[in-house]
Amino acid sequence: MMQPYANIKILDLTHVLAGPFATYQFALLGAEVIKIEDPANPDCARGRGPDAMQNAELRGLNFQVQASNKKAMTLDLKTEEGQSILKMLVKDADILVENYRSGALSKLGLAYSDLKKVNSKLIYCSITGFGNNGPKAEVNAYDNVIQATSGVITQSGGHKPGVSFVDYAAGYNAAFAISAALHQLEVTGRGKHISCSMLEVAMTLMAPEAAAAQHPIKTLRDKEPGISSYSTKNGILMMGAFTHSQNRRMWRCLIELGYTVPEDLCSPTDWDSLWAAGEQIKITLSDILLDKNATEWQELFHAVGVPAERERTLSEAVLDPQLENYFEQVEGVTLPKAAFHFEGGAEITTPPPKFSEHTDEILMGIGISKSEIKRHRKNGVIA
């Protein structure tokens, strides 16, 4: 069965994480994704990961997890020859994705306003820290500084979460926007420029909190004790008694097990009643849950329809049978696929490309001769 994006060609001028992750979604779904790197400066993700040998070979794990199914070529976009070659590639492309500092490609004559003259149907997506407009448009940013300036870190207790989730969310955000633009293209016949801001993505991920911050606080709410973590006899248990009915089932379960529960906790009627009883709920659960280990509590609460999970290490989590179809072995390396499944959907068909692996193949495909390729390589336009 043909994959959803089998006839789509994407020029991937991205690096590090958010941009490559966006284009990876299309590569998994059949698009031809051509990763274009500077011949003298490979994507720094190629040199990052836990395996020093892989890093030295420019195939670090940080790169590999978002590079399968892509082709790789090099092109010095600071040269007239490189710019000319990119425009040749644009003629036959559907999408271009870049995550340079806002305005960087414009100075090279490679902005959307320049390239739409070459291909009026081109969808040109820019992923930046702060968007393409405003006082911070040209300020460089990474996930960690976006988490800091957006308020995510203070919302997380003053510490940066251990994963770059804004980067990943920005990648998904861009992929969704590109998909929408492709759909619109079928109607209008015209391409467009998409601007994706990591700062706005961070705000989107905290939509209720961000919206509340725009209004006077009427009542300061503490964290709900029914959806908090608790120490047990062995391990930490994260409770997920979010709704009134889940709270009622949680207390009923504990009473049936022989534990004493204050009567006024057993029948919450609304959110305010849960918040009002918050301190008593926390004290009661903290005392009772110390009686068994986290795995025992997890099974007991699952049996009555109350979400609860033992906090696991990542090393434990990746071995979960639920993830059996999420990972795939590619040339001895375990790599993640897409977090969704459907017939004719995401699959890994080729391993992550070596640096500049497909340069000659791609250039010959647009009519550049072997002698010209040799000259471009000698002049440093390609590697």
Image (cartoon, helix red, strand yellow):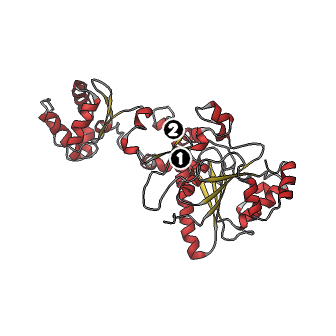
Element type at mark 1: helix
CA gap, disc 2 to disc 1? 9 Å
Q: Which residue is mark 2?
A: 163
The residue located at (73%, 57%) in the rendering is: 361
Binning the other alpha carbons within 10 Å of mark 1 as few (below 14), some (14 to 19) or many (20 upward) gives many
The residue located at (79%, 60%) in the rendering is: 85
**Dividing the picture into quarters, in which one does residue 52 lie?**
top right
The residue located at (53%, 52%) in the rendering is: 348
Residue 224: image location, x then y, percent? 31, 38
Residue type at numbered disc 2: Val
Element type at mark 2: loop
Relative vertical location of residue 93 with respect to residue 38 in this rendering, above or below: below
**Dividing the picture into quarters, in which one does residue 219 lie?**
top left
Q: Tag on residue 168?
A: 1
Residue sitting farthest toward the front: 331
Residue 217 seen in render: no
The residue located at (86%, 57%) in the rendering is: 371
Q: Are marks 2 and 1 in contact (CB under 8 Å)?
A: yes
Q: Going by the image, does 262 lie left or right of 14?
A: left
Residue 180: image location, x then y, percent? 53, 65
Q: Going by the image, does 96 lie left or right of 289?
A: right
Q: Tag on residue 261?
A: none
Residue sitting nearer the eye, 349 or 127:
349
Residue 22: image location, x then y, percent? 57, 53
Q: Going by the image, does 73 lie left or right of 160?
A: right
Residue type at numbered disc 1: Tyr
Residue sitting nearer the eye, 21 or 260:
21
